[in-house]
């Protein structure tokens, strides 16, 4: 509202009359001010206010009209180019004559005002001031010599003769007061014309610092109601006064000299004031002439704007109607008030008739479009409430739609990814690499119908997706992919099956172990002392082997029981690197010959994990790595932790490497399945338990053989969700 009111105020004829009134008032004040200097001083502020008001009104008019013209020209508005040509033409015609008049008027003003002041008077006053300054400088140099003489004289005097000598020296040099003091301001002695004074005139600390630095002070300072010439000089050190001292001498300035100096300065200041007023007069006349010049130019420009708007108004109305049609507004009707009976009026009537017919056709199309929109809304509602993720792609693999369930399962916001290709999707969300690779292969191969399982590791950890896809029936319609998160279902089925197997095996094996062990120990206890030496050795070896194998079988039964049981996790907030260090320290102390290479990222933060289960996982991995690396003479186990961060992943990775013989391709396929082991006496449950523990913590584990020999096991598990700022502070 305020902007509209300002534009309306600056676009009518009222500003022109206001500007003319201000101009007349300014001319009247100018003519009154030139009568005398007192009148000029009194009217200077009103003149300045009037001139500023004129400039503000003028600036508002010019900015409003020129700004609107520039916007119309940039927007290719109808009639804007014609308006620009008219404006340029009238401005050129108006500026020429007015500029010549302006130039000669300014010359007349400058020369006329300069003739009011006599330059020779100013030169005489300058000479008088220079003469007085020269005389004062001469007198000050003389007083400086006297003060330095006194300082030199009193420098070697003992304290008892100092006061009398200062009094004599003061009378000798004709000073009002002489004082000797330290650089800290402590008074040593002083002499003054005024016998009643108890202390000398104080010296400013800045002056004392200046004199202490080796620079004497000379100046005129008021003191005790009079003007004195103050001189402060340094006093050489002596055997009586080894500390630095200064001497202050005050000389009275005669009243006659003061009056002469004041008279010369007053006359000079009065002349300078008169000279100063010449500038404001010149400025005021120049400002008034400038306003007249700008007003003349603006009048021509304003007339051009007014006439151009009148001429191009019908064309502009048609252009507005055409743009409305282009935007789909078929109900716009053009007014006929400007030119109802001429050719332009007939054109506007025909345009309105055409608009009516188009509007009726558009309503028919809108009803058909509304039916399609309802069908689309119905389909979107169904997809939005499905628990399965649904995504559609065109023939080139560009994402077209994705429902809310797809975003929840993938753990990513898919709205910004619409119209992105599969490769761009991976760049935005790297954790979807396996999922996108599967989609890419089927879309590139134009597979009609397919079903496949994909593994995804995102912010929620490891996920198993059951994906089904099909090509849409219409040619070049693209593909649709439907997927579900079956992680929990498959894991529950697998855990239940293997847990039941482990439970039964543990039950069947555990029952005969204790009788076997007891029987072997009874044989040793009963027959070992009674048998011959050769037979006793044979019995000892046999029973020892039985007992040892029973203990091994008990360990295997315990592993079966651990795998079959699924204890409730006792989640705690743990320092991941600290837990890794504690586990590795046990192996350092147990086996001093085993070499370890440990690289733990200090930026790795906290994890929510079961302390016991996490340590069991680490023990299994490190123990396997040590056993594998012992096949190499230069046994080495390398442990590394690192932070993994992206837009959708905040996790820690732990790498455990050995320099053994590596993992065969046959073993790699079913490495983490229960009862799969490459060790002669292995139960095959170690890595299965590791995999189960890491999956309980929403993590993932994978293995790979190294080209240089050996194997690498990598686990990835989510870090504790803490604010980014806190993570940086912890780091």
Image: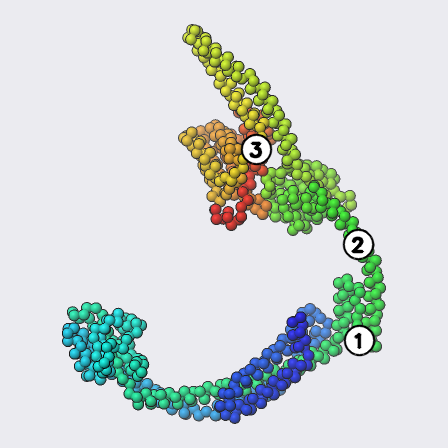
Q: Could you tell me if residue 709 is visible in this image?
A: no
Viewer-closest of 354 and 420: 354
Q: Which mark is residue 337?
A: 1
Query: Callout 3: helix, strand or loop?
Result: loop
Q: CA distance from mark 1 to mark 2?
A: 38 Å
Asked whether the residues under the numbered discs 1 and 2 touch, taking CB atoms below 8 Å apart as contact, a structural biologist would say no
Find residue 370 and name its label: 2
Which residue: 76% across, 72% down?
A: 317
Question: Could you tell which of marks 1 and 3 lies nearer the N-terminus?
Answer: 1
Of badges 1 and 3, the one in the foreground is: 3
Q: Nearer the viewer, residue 186 or 482?
A: 186
Image location of residue 190, percent across then percent down: 21, 77
Q: Can see residue 690?
A: yes
- Measured as percent of width and height from the top left, residue 379 is found at 76, 47
Q: Residues within 10 Å of mark 2 (few under 14, many from 20)?
A: few
Residue 164: x %, y % from top left: 16, 78
How far apart marks 1 and 3 lie (CA) works out to 86 Å
Other residues around mark 3 within 10 Å, as few (<14) / some (14–19) / many (≥20): few
Q: Residue furthest front?
A: 196
Q: Is residue 97 above or below residue 2?
A: below
Q: Earlier in the sequence, mark 3 or mark 2?
A: 2
| 261 in relation to 619, above or below | below
Check residue 568 in the rendering and tell me which mark sits there, or answer none: 3
SS type, badge 2: helix
């Amino acid at each position: 509202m305020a902007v509209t009111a300002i534009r309306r105020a600056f676009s009518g004829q009222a500003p022109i009359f206001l500007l003319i009134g201000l101009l007349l008032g300014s001319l009247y004040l100018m003519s009154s001010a030139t009568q005398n200097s007192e009148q000029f001083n009194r009217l200077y502020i009103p003149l300045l206010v009037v001139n500023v008001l004129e400039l503000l009104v003028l600036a508002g008019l010019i900015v409003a009209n020129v700004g609107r013209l520039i916007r119309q020209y940039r927007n290719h508005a109808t009639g804007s180019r014609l308006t620009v040509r008219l404006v340029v033409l009238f401005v050129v015609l108006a500026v020429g004559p007015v500029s010549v008049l302006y130039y000669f008027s300014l010359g007349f003003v400058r020369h006329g005002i300069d003739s009011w002041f006599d330059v020779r008077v100013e030169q005489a006053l300058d000479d008088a001031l220079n003469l007085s300054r020269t005389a004062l400088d001469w007198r000050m140099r003389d007083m400086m010599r006297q003060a330095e003489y006194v300082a030199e004289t009193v420098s070697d005097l003992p304290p008892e003769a100092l006061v009398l000598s200062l009094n004599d020296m003061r009378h000798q040099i004709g000073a009002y007061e002489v004082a000797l003091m330290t650089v800290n301001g402590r008074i040593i002695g002083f002499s003054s014309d005024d016998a009643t004074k108890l202390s000398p005139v104080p010296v400013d600390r800045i002056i004392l610092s200046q004199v202490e630095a080796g620079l004497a002070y000379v100046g005129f300072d008021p003191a005790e109601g009079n003007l004195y010439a103050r001189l402060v000089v340094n006093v050489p050190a002596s055997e009586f006064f080894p500390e630095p001292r200064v001497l202050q001498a005050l000389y009275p300035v005669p009243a006659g000299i003061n009056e002469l100096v004041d008279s010369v300065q007053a006359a000079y200041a009065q002349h300078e004031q008169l000279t100063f007023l010449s500038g404001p007069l010149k400025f005021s006349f120049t400002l008034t002439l400038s306003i007249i010049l700008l007003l003349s130019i603006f009048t021509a420009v304003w007339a051009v704007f007014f006439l151009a708007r009148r001429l191009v108004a019908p064309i502009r109305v048609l252009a507005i109607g055409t743009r409305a049609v282009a935007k789909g507004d078929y109900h716009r009707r053009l007014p006929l008030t400007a030119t109802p009976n001429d050719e332009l009026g007939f054109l506007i009537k025909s345009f309105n008739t055409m608009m009516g017919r188009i509007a009726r056709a558009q309503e028919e199309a809108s009803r058909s479009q509304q039916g399609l929109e309802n069908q689309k809304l119905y389909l979107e509602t169904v997809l939005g409430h499905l628990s399965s993720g649904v995504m559609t792609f065109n023939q080139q693999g560009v994402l077209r739609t994705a429902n809310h369930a797809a975003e929840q399962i993938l753990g990513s916001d898919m709205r910004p990814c619409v119209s992105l290709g599969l490769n761009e999707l991976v760049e935005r969300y790297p954790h979807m690499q396996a999922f996108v690779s599967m989609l890419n292969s089927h879309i590139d191969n134009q597979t009609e119908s397919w079903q496949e399982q994909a593994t995804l590791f995102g912010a929620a950890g490891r996920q198993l997706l059951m994906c089904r896809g099909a090509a849409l029936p219409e040619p070049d319609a693209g593909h649709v992919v439907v997927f579900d998160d079956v992680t929990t279902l498959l894991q529950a089925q697998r855990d239940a099956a293997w847990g039941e197997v482990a439970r039964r095996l543990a039950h069947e094996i555990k029952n005969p172990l204790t009788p076997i062990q007891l029987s072997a120990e009874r044989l040793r206890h009963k027959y070992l002392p009674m048998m011959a030496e050769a037979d006793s050795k044979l019995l000892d070896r046999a029973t020892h082997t039985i007992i040892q194998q029973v203990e091994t079988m008990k360990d295997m039964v315990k592993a079966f029981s651990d795998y079959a049981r699924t204890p409730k996790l006792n989640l705690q907030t743990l320092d991941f690197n600290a837990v890794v260090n504690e586990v590795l320290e046990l192996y350092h102390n147990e086996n001093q010959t085993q070499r370890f290479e440990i690289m733990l990222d200090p930026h790795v933060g906290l994890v929510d994990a079961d302390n016991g289960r996490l340590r069991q996982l680490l023990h299994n991995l490190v123990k396997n790595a040590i056993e594998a690396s012992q096949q190499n003479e230069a046994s080495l186990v390398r442990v590394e932790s690192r932070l993994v961060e992206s837009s959708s992943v905040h996790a820690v990775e732990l790498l455990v490497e050995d320099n053994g013989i590596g993992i065969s391709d046959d073993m790699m396929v079913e490495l983490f399945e229960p009862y799969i082991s490459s060790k002669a006496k292995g139960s095959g449950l170690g890595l299965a338990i590791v995999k189960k523990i890491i999956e309980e913590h929403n993590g993932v584990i994978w293995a790979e053989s190294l080209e240089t020999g050996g194997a690498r096991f990598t686990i990835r598990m989510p870090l504790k969700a803490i604010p980014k700022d806190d993570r940086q502070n912890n780091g």
